[in-house]
Amino acid sequence: MEFPTGFDLKAIRTFTFVVELGGMTQAAQRLEMTQSSVSQTISNLEEAIGSALFDRTVRPIALTPTGVTLYDHSRDILAAAGDTLQALREQQGRRLTSLTLGMPESFANTVGPMLAESLDRYASRWRIWSGISPENHDALMNHAVDMIVTTSDELDSLEGLEIHPLLEEPFVLVFPADYKHPATGLEAHTDLRFIRYSLRSAIGRQVERQINRLRLNLPITAEFDTASGQLAAVAAGTGWSVTTPLCLLQEYAKVGEQVRVEPIKRGQFSRSLKLIARKGALGDVPRSIAGESRKILQNKGLELLFERHPWIRNLIVWPERQTG
């Protein structure tokens, strides 16, 4: 079949950016094009197809039925093109020009440095951005990053994404080192205040859901946006909290001797980490980086915690074990 001028991958990619970012101005900024260039590309594409893609009589602009059909197919077209390009690059031993990963602070500060050597094999230039999950999700959907590591399930049902499980880790209790009272669950320890993670983060919301599920009354008096602040406060004797092995690991050199770590025996719960990328956009790179990340975690990433707190090893669930 002969394709008309204007119907090409660049035009389809530009069209997809306009749809997903909500307008030509936003797409132009992300693509580093002028707005007039984006508008002309869309006009050429419409001329090639012979039908309007956007209803420009409404604000914000909306897709026409033809536009909906093209958008439904565009993700498959771009994914197939990405797979083809990646296969050709791998055949020639070429790396990606650049690669950007978004991930939680705990993962970036523990696995990130050890993952750096592997990233050199995949891209000439790479970046690791850390931040809270909602920000990373937006960055992935807006094409600001190529893949993310997340603990949230907010993106699980969206089409056009590929998901690679990394591990499931338990939540654990942390107290000041000199705290001597028994601790088995999330019930209130009235002699200490409960220090929360901020509800701006996925981990904070998950902890809060568990507290509500167990119908516990833990007054809101102190909260932190980061594991660094939270665990430092516990180490200083300000209160007790709930965290995960990865969050604890990133601060262990600073607070390891100043906190008491205990399993949650009543009301135990966990969080799952996964790597998510746009389907087919990077070939086999997301799967490979997910595999590298699991190896790091299994072979050396968590060893310090396993040595100091052997019971943690038995509570970690790896994807192979989940799937049999």
Image: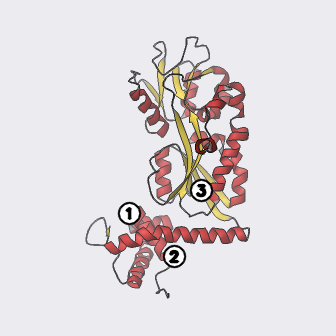
Which residue is drawn at the image coordinates 66% and 50% (left, top)? 291
Residue 276 image point, x, y percent = 54, 53
Which residue is drawn at the image coordinates 62% and 71% (left, top)? 85
The local secondary structure at tag 2 comes to helix
Residue 5, placed above or below residue 243: below
Q: Is 148 left, or right, of 258 in this rendering?
A: left
Amino acid carrying label 3: it is Thr
Q: CA distance from mark 2 to mark 1?
A: 20 Å
Residue 266, placed above or below residue 51: above
Amino acid carrying label 2: it is Leu
Q: Is 129 left, or right, of 47 in this rendering?
A: right
Residue 103 visible, this angle: no
Q: CA distance from mark 1 to mark 3?
A: 22 Å
Residue 248, placed above or below residue 276: above
Residue 281 visible, this angle: yes
Number of the front mark, 2 or 1:
2
Circle 1 sits on which residue?
22
* Residue 9 numbered tag: 2
Residue 266 image point, x, y percent = 50, 22
Query: Does label 2 or label 1 sit earlier along the sequence?
Result: 2
Circle 3 sits on which residue?
100
Image quadrant in which you'd find residue 177? top right
Few, some or many C-alpha atoms within 10 Å of disc 3 (few <14, some 14-19, many ≥20)? some
Amino acid carrying label 1: it is Gly
